[in-house]
Image (cartoon, rainbow, N blue to C red):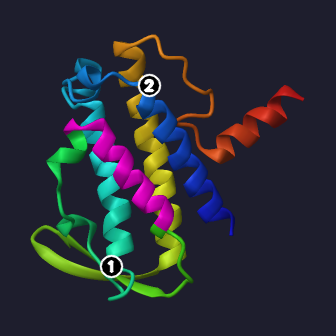
Amino acid sequence: MKIFESSIDTIEQFKSILLELPDVHYAAPCNVLSGASIGQHTRHVIELYLCLIKGYESCEVSYDKRERDRKIETEVAYAIEQLQFIQEHLYHPNKNINMTYELDGIENILPSNYHREVMYNLEHAIHHHALIKIGILHFTDIKLPESFGVAPSTISYRKTCVQ
């Protein structure tokens, strides 16, 4: 299924970029990211994926109540391990899931399904990759793929504009 292939490929691209990033820049606050670090953005992406994977069996997911693991935002190697775990455990058959979220102190439940949430996580990851790209370019001269942090629909649109 394409959403899984795209998710796995996007994570693979991200892992290869993180392997080039010096640890000192990974956890450093970045003024162009409002003081956040590349590692903090990475942690956020990873934790939402992990939250979804861990909630699959119970059909209950709350991104608000996800586990927060600061080790992900400070250690590149550990973040890459977590990304590998996601790649290995992401694929599941579709089924209904209850998404729980809090607004104004009130807990709400929204029906969703696993494949829809995988797609949400893919789009969410790409959005954060765009921010991470800004941080990487601020700190380093690493040559990043043009597709990093760009939605597949944008890439397709750009291709049609060139023709």
Q: Residue 148: name its quadrant.
A: top right
The amino acid type of the residue labelled 2 equals Glu
Label 1: how many residues lie within 10 Å, few (<14), some (14-19) or many (20+)?
A: some
Above or below for 59 versus 127: below
Quadrant that contains the N terminus:
bottom right
> Would residue 75 be found to the left or right of residue 49 on screen?
left
Q: Residue at x 24, y 46 (%)?
A: 72
> Would residue 122 be found to the left or right of residue 39 on screen?
right
Above or below for 83 versus 52: above
* Distance from Cα at disc 2 to Cα at disc 1: 32 Å
Label 2: how many residues lie within 10 Å, few (<14), some (14-19) or many (20+)?
A: few
Is the stretch drawn in magenta largely helix, strand or loop?
helix
Which residue is most to the top?
141
Whether residue 81 appears in magenta in the rendering, the answer is yes
Secondary structure beneath disc 1?
helix
Secondary structure beneath disc 2?
helix
Above or below for 56 versus 42: below
Whether residue 141 appears in magenta in the rendering, the answer is no
Q: Which residues are magenta?
A: 74-88
Q: Position of residue 37 (x, y in %)?
A: 24, 30
**Mark 2 vs mark 1: in front:** 2
Q: Residue at x 30, y 32 (%)?
A: 38
Q: Residue at x 29, y 46 (%)?
A: 78
The amino acid type of the residue labelled 1 equals Gly
Upstream in the sequence, badge 2 or badge 1?
Answer: 2
Q: Give the labeled residue for mark 1.
A: 55
Q: Which mark is residue 111?
A: none
Q: Position of residue 51 (x, y in %)?
A: 31, 68
Q: Give the labeled residue for mark 2.
A: 20
Q: Residue at x 53, y 79 (%)?
A: 92
Q: Position of residue 155 (x, y in %)?
A: 69, 38
